């Protein structure tokens, strides 16, 4: 049955030929390659739960009187968007689970993109020939942040509404076109009635469509260019060592996808996220205390907070204060991020192709620079909690704010040389990165002392096996199937290409599809 | 069967011929260590992976039951996660321990074309282009004209129609000369409505709840001897009569990023914006004393009419809220 179905498609689309190569696509065995998969799978969670949410969410700012099951809000005027969000959380079975999973998955999505990007950065995987994929990836990060913001703005609650108010001011602050851009984006002056429907269509259709296309391009380029790999035994620029797509990688990665779903589910079971019914509906003249955006907007919020109160006025025009932290800073951040492969190539003069990754310690300048920049954004992130910290530590807000202004400059200046020194130190230790082995001091009968190195631990001493090349035409019968090996030396007739070096008497079958002759 | 032969000949793929064509490799043996599964004890690995799947079965059945019985979100989420967790655990164990442990490798070739390939491509592209395009200068220009006009007119539905032009809307609020100060319920505020240190959000009657006309009315003090709160020296003349009977009103829209400046500290007589912690000194014309806000909050000139109601002497004399490019004019 399955054979017949497969044949039907194969005859029409020619799957076997190119599909055969895909089966042998090699994925390197290193944990750091999993981080990108977390991003991919949380995106799948986002799509699945998001589709569910669109069935119940009403993207409208129209005022209604809430008459749902949540008693404290009953009788209050709220927008339809807010009412439907509360309804799908309480009145729809499984609705709260889907909503919480959606929000958690969004946080995980952006987080895993950032960590994935750090891995790519610190190991130099963005270098030629992968500059293009770095640009696609960093574009995905920007879109993910934007779409996350749009998404948590949709419920029209007090916290997110304040965020929209701030974003209106940010767009308004762009020199020359700011007020026009704000009026066109938001459909008039704040708040208006267009924000929810517009954000909605951007959030559920426009940005996801672009992201799906970019993710396709990201993976397509990955398959075409093949993975990078860490330096190691038998790892050369001319090969990729690891696990083949079928069946091993498929099994592991599908399992990993399910585990990502499970973790998202556990988070939504135990940790409440964005309880909009506690915040209440958005009204422009109300504001709640300790308002923090989702974590990936934290660095922008922090930058807004610690920016000194400067503003440029002259010649009848103004460059408002928020322009610097909220337009200029992200502009420079994302600009440098996207152009980094070219900036680094220019600085180092290294324009060669690289298939083997760097150990971060072997590129101390890049590592130190990356760590310093990251620490800067980490301080900004911390600065988005100035009010909470001041409250929690019972110190004055002034002290907290002033220290963050100071830290934003000082921390990167400290992190750079420290990281640089650590890298240099690690370089000079030949066994850096390996598990430590004790030096055992022995006392001889005569009273002398000798030092012996401890045995390797069992796990570390596994004899390494050389990788087995799975080139396109080589197939194997794994010993695991227990299929007896039958000699088959039928000569190659229809292939004009050179046969692989040497000929053995071993048959080559598929992994699961056993050739008919052996059945 | 002519079709079959055609298909087989046409594709030329190894898989398409009736008999598999295999190219064996001398060094590879079916019992090579790479083909061995990673588990020392496959039976045990199988039991572990299988328990994962059975756990998943229990979890998903539990999810169904919880859904059916309309249990809380917690039980839905727990059963759901146990299901997927078991599934994922089983799959990972299966892949990690019961499949060839490798490592395997594939070869990698540079994707950069040879000089010859590139030349052929460019040659074909350019020579065909020359014949087809370059000799038709008129067509190219006409096409460019049409597309250019399309581009310009598309800007109207896709950009211009998105919203109204700002006009003067950012410069003026709904406050007018003589506007009553009403609260969110529409009740007119009169003297004595607030205790000393009390404050409330007020609007003009025709824009209740308005995002830009929201104004903070604060009773800073008992009525001073002069009848008015004393403004700071630089406003001594202009604002001498703006704050009658110890009451003062400032725009509630933060001059930093537009949040409502919703908190008033009675002890220090300062207004705090909870978004980015700008602090405005109410006794000093709401000048920002801390935080990122660059400008004071605009002050609404008040008077008390013969019936004791608060009213605006006039609208705000400057745009309220955050800055924008054209604002430097005012």
Image (cartoon, coloured by chain):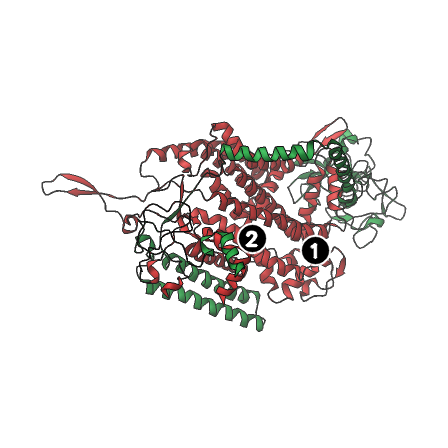
Tag shown at residue B4: none
In the image, taking residue B19 as reference, residue A464 lies left or right, namely left
Secondary structure beneath label 1 = loop
On-image quarter of the C terminus of chain A: bottom left
Between disc 2 and disc 1, whose residue precedes? 2
Residue that mark 1 sits on: A281
Q: Residues within 10 Å of mark 1 (few under 14, many from 20)?
A: many
Q: Is residue A391 visible?
A: no
The residue lying furthest to the front in this view is B2
Q: Position of residue A433 (x, y in %)?
A: 35, 41
Q: Residue at x 54, y 39 (%)?
A: A132
Under circle 2, the secondary element is helix
Residue B163 position in % (x across, y down): 78, 44
Colour applied to chain B: green
Q: Position of residue B297 (x, y in %)?
A: 74, 38
Identity of the residue furthest to the right in this view: B306
In the rendered structure, the residue with mark 1 lies on which chain?
A
Residue A360 visible in image: yes
Rendered colour, chain A:
red
Query: Residue at label 2?
Result: A43
């Amino acid at each position: 049955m399955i054979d017949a179905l497969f044949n039907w498609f194969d005859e029409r689309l020619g799957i076997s030929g190119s599909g055969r190569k895909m089966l042998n696509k090699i994925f390197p065995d290193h944990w750091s390659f999993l981080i990108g998969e977390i991003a991919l799978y949380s995106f799948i969670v986002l799509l699945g739960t998001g589709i569910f949410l669109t069935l119940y969410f009403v993207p409208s700012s129209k005022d209604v009187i809430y008459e749902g099951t949540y008693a404290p809000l009953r009788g209050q005027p709220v927008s339809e968007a807010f009412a439907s969000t509360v309804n799908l959380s309480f009145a729809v079975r499984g609705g709260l689970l889907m909503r919480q999973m959606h929000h958690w998955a969004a946080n995980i999505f952006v987080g895993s993109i950032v960590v994935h990007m750090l891995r790519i950065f610190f190991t130099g995987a963005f270098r030629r020939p992968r500059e293009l994929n770095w640009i696609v990836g960093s574009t995905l990060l920007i879109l993910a942040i934007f779409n996350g913001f749009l998404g948590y703005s949709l419920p029209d609650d007090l916290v997110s509404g304040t965020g929209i108010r701030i974003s209106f001011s940010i767009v308004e602050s762009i020199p020359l076109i700011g007020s026009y851009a704000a009026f066109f984006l938001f459909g008039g002056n704040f708040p208006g009635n267009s924000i929810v429907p517009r954000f909605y269509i951007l959030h559920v259709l426009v940005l996801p469509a672009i992201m799906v296309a970019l993710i396709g391009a990201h993976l397509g380029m990955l398959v075409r260019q093949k993975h990078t790999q860490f330096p190691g035994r038998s790892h050369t620029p001319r090969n990729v060592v690891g696990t083949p797509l079928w069946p091993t990688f498929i099994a592991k990665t599908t399992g990993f996808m399910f585990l990502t779903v499970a973790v998202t589910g556990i988070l939504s079971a135990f940790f409440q996220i964005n309880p909009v019914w506690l915040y209440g509906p958005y009204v422009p003249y109300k504001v709640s205390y300790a308002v923090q955006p989702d974590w990936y907007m934290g660095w922008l919020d922090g930058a807004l907070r610690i920016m000194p109160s400067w503003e440029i006025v002259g010649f009848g025009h103004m460059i408002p204060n928020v322009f610097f932290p909220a337009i200029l800073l992200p502009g420079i951040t994302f600009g440098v991020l996207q152009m980094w492969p070219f900036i680094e190539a220019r600085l180092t003069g290294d324009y060669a192709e690289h298939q083997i990754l760097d150990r971060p310690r072997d590129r101390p300048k890049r590592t130190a620079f990356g760590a310093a920049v990251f620490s800067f954004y980490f301080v900004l992130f911390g600065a988005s909690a100035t009010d909470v910290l001041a409250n929690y530590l019972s110190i004055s807000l002034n002290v907290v704010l002033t220290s963050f202004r100071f830290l934003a400059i000082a921390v990167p200046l400290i992190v750079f040389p420290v990281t640089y020194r650590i890298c240099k130190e690690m370089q000079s230790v030949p066994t850096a990165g390996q598990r430590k082995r004790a030096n055992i001091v022995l006392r001889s009968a005569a009273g002398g002392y000798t030092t012996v190195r401890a045995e390797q631990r069992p796990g570390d001493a596994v004899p390494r096996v050389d990788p087995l090349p799975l080139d396109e035409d080589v197939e194997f019968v794994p010993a695991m199937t227990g299929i007896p090996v039958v000699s088959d030396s039928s000569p190659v007739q229809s292939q004009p290409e050179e046969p692989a070096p040497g000929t053995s008497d071993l048959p080559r079958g598929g992994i699961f599809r056993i050739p008919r002759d052996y059945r | 069967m002519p079709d079959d032969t055609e298909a087989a000949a046409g594709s030329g793929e190894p898989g398409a011929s009736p008999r598999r064509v295999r190219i064996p490799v001398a060094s590879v043996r079916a019992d090579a260590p790479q083909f061995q599964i990673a588990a020392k004890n496959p039976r045990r690995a199988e039991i572990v992976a299988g328990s994962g799947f059975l756990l998943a079965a229990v979890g998903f059945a539990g999810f169904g039951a919880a859904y059916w019985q309309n249990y809380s979100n917690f039980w839905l989420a727990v059963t759901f996660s146990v299901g997927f967790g078991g599934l994922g655990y089983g799959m990972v164990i299966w892949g990690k321990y019961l499949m060839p442990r490798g490592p395997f490798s594939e070869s990698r070739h540079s994707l950069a074309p040879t000089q010859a390939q590139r030349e052929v491509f460019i040659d074909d592209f350019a020579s065909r282009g020359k014949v087809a395009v370059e000799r038709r200068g008129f067509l190219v220009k006409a096409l460019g004209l049409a597309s250019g006009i399309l581009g310009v007119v598309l800007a109207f539905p896709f950009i211009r129609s998105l919203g109204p032009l700002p006009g003067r809307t950012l410069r003026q609020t709904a406050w007018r000369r003589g506007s009553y100060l009403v609260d969110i319920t529409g009740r007119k505020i009169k003297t004595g409505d607030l205790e000393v240190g009390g404050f409330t959000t007020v609007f003009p009657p025709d824009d209740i709840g308005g995002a830009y006309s929201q104004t903070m009315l604060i009773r800073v003090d008992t009525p001073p001897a002069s009848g008015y709160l004393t403004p700071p020296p630089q406003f001594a003349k202009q604002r001498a009569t703006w704050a009658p009977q110890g009451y003062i009103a400032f725009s509630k829209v933060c001059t930093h990023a537009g949040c409502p400046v919703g908190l008033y500290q009675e002890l220090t007589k300062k207004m705090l914006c909870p978004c980015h912690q700008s602090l405005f000194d109410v006794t000093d014309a709401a000048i920002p004393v801390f935080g990122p806000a660059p400008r004071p909050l605009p002050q609404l000139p008040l008077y008390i009419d013969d019936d004791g109601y608060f009213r605006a002497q006039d609208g705000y004399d400057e745009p309220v809220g955050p800055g924008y490019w054209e604002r430097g004019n005012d």
